[in-house]
Image: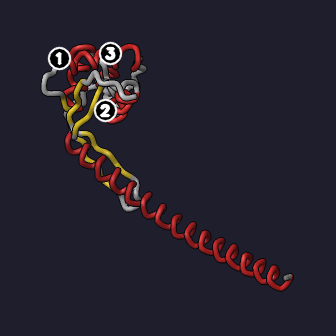
Amino acid sequence: MSKELEALNTYLTALITHRSELRRDYMIQDKELGKEIMVLLERIRETEARIRGEEFGVDEFITDSGEAEVAVATAEIAPVEADTVPTSRKNRAKLDYPGDVVPKTIALLREAENGLTGRELLNLLKEKYGFEFSNPTIAINRILSFTNEIKKDNRTFYYSSDEIV
């Protein structure tokens, strides 16, 4: 029995050693790929800056030392207002789904004779009630989770008074 246990421990040690070697190799490859990605991103930024500079009348010259020298043309660059800068993400709205969104959704579906697609439903909720959803899929799933009165057939949502028991 002790030889079997010793053999299993030896095998376990070999597997753990092999696993750590694979992780080490993976980490080295990951670092190399990370460096390549950083170089490509830097080149993309330089190219975008060069393109933007051409759009706004800015000429950019890269010297042999790699430093950029910028010469501005005679055109004036208008200052950017703080209000005109677009945000990269939508603001998260805190909505009362069970008390506010679901009853209004049911009312809209009752009015629709042929049902509504998810896009139509969310557009109507936005137009009529001003509900902004940052993620339409999550919004639909949350609405469906709070009620059994809304049925889905393919991509169309219907109102159904049948309660699931």
- Disc 1 and disc 2: Cα gap in Å? 21 Å
Position above or below: 5 against 69: below
Mark closest to the chain's N terminus, 2 or 3: 3
SS at circle 3: helix
List the residue tagged with mark 1: 111
Left or right relative to 44: residue 34: right
The furthest residue to the front:
165
User: Where the N terminus falls, by quadrant?
Assistant: bottom right
Mark 2: which secondary structure? Answer: helix
Q: How far apart are labels 1 and 3 at the CA level?
A: 13 Å
Q: Crowding at label 3, few (<14), some or many (≥20) Cα neighbours within 10 Å?
A: some
Lateral position of residue 74 relative to residue 145, left or right: left
Q: Nearer the viewer, residue 67 or 2?
A: 2
Please say if the residues under marks 1 and 2 sit with CB atoms less than 8 Å apart. no
Which residue sits at x=29%, y=53%?
47
Question: Where residue 12 sits in the image (x, y, percent)?
Answer: 72, 76
Q: Position of residue 94 (x, y in %)?
A: 42, 20
Quadrant of the rendered structure where residue 150 is? top left
Residue at point 30%, 24% (across, down): 162
Residue 136 has which mark? 2
- Say which amino acid is labelled 1: Glu
Give the residue type at disc 2: Pro
Q: How many marks?
A: 3
Report whether residue 62 is seen: yes
Q: Is residue 104 above or below residue 162?
A: above
Q: For the view shown, which residue lies furthest in the left direction?
A: 114
Name the element at disc 1. Answer: helix
Q: Residues within 10 Å of mark 1 (few under 14, many from 20)?
A: few
Q: Which of disc 2 and disc 1 is earlier in sequence?
A: 1
Residue in the picture at 76% in, 79% down: 8
**Which is more foreground, mark 1 or mark 2?**
1
Kindly identify which residue carries mark 3: 103
